[in-house]
Each structure stands twice: as C-alpha cells, then as structure tokens.
Amino acid sequence: MDERALADRVSAVTALGDPARRAVYDLVCRRDEPISRDQAASTLGVTRRSAAFHLDRLAEQGLLAVEFRRLTGRTGPGSGRPAKLYRRARDEISVSVPDRRYDLAGEVMAAAIERSISAGEPVGDALVGVAADTGRAIGAGATDLRQALETHGFEPRDDGRGGLLLGNCPFHRLAVRHTHIVCGLNLELIRGITAGLDDTDHAAVLDPGPGRCCVKVHPA
C-alpha cells in the first residue's frame, strides 16, 4: 500500500507530463528485461546524457527501480563497471483529488473475506475485526492521531470543542453506494488507530454530516 503523501504522489505523476520523459518510461515498461542508459538512448534516438537524465528522474520519483549488473558476463579485474539498469517499479502510484484510498478499503475487504472463509466467521464480523486490526497497525506506526488521519486522507480539522471533524472520506464512492458497510469500516478503522496509538483522549463515533466523513472524533 502506498503511504506517500499526496504531494509526493502528485509530483511523481507530474514527472510523466514531459513528452520525452514519458517516452522513456513507456520504453522501459514495454521491455521484459531492465534497460541500460545506452539502450534507451539508442532506441529512442536521443543522447545518452538525455536518456540518463530522464531515467534517473523517473527513478527518483519512484516510478522506476534501479539495479546494477555487468552486461558482458565477465567478472573480476578488467571486466568493467556494472551497468546501471532500470525497470518499472513494482508498486503503483495513484493520485485523486480529493485524496481517496480505495486500495486500503480493498485490502481490508479482501482480508475480511479470507478471514470469513477460513474461520467460518460471518463476513460482517470479520470486516469489523480486520478494520480494527488494520487501524491498530496504522496507529502503532504513527506519531499522533492527527498525523495518522492526515496520512490516510481523512483531512482532520478542529471542531472548536476539542474534537476533530474529518473533512474527507477516503472511500467516498464506495460509501455512496454501500453506506452502512463503508461507514462501519471507517468507524472501526479509526477506533483501531486510536487504540494503536494508546490514545485515550479521543473517541470515534458515527456522526455523519454533509461534505465530510461519517465519523467524528470527540474528546473521550
């Protein structure tokens, strides 16, 4: 799951806006084997320096992965330096505005279905358990509640009474069509985050309102 900040993901996708860089990226993606700077330059009819610049920029943005290997097959002294090779990165980068996290919802739901099948547990109960477990894992790796919620697209903001309004639902389209299921997932996920943080100062409750998440965080 990609936990990079929205600004970083936007920057990565924006890197493909340059036609020359997009051509380099498309070339790498069409190949089964990693490609060198020389191979990219020769195939695209550009200078090696230009190919290297675009390849490295794509790697810096996380769109390409890098490895080093000798292409001659020789080893030992005199075999030359390993070539820098590029291939498409395994992880995908997605951007939506407002920030949506359908990958997170999909992972929670798939894990709940697996748990239901393997344990014979009703799928609704499994979803509650998996959402809470996922939230606890998120909370355990966070520094505070606001940071955890911000990272996962909830857009927390002060409500003026010591609580937090969540200005965005990361699973909006799903929530529109499957309100009861997705709002329950949200609630258990956020309760899990507070538990993972050992945060006893806040309590998550269902409190839907227009233009925001169905969950609100109250002072405990």
Image (cartoon, helix red, strand yellow):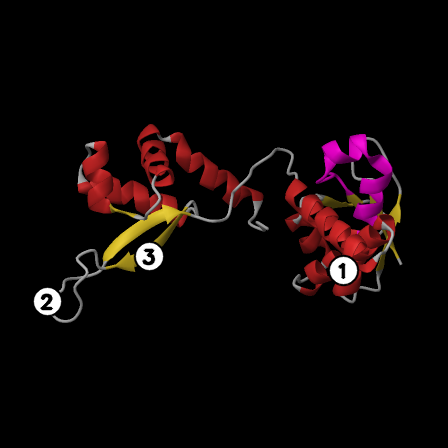
Q: Residue 178: where, in percent of width, then height?
A: 82, 34
Classify residue 181 by image quadrant: top right
Comparing marks 2 and 1, which lies closer to the viewer? 2
Q: Residue at x 64, y 50 (%)?
A: 151
Where the C terminus falls, by quadrant? Answer: bottom right
Q: Residue 26: where, in percent of width, then height?
A: 36, 34
Residue type of the residue flagged with mark 2: Gly
Residue type of the residue flagged with mark 1: Asp
Nearer the observer, 202 or 30: 30
Cα distance in 3D space between marks 1 and 3 = 36 Å
Q: For mark 1, what is the residue?
A: 133
Residue extent of the magenta highlight: 166-188
Secondary element at tag 1: helix
Q: Residue 194: where, in percent of width, then height?
A: 78, 60
Cα distance in 3D space between marks 3 and 2 = 21 Å
Nearer the observer, 158 or 62: 62
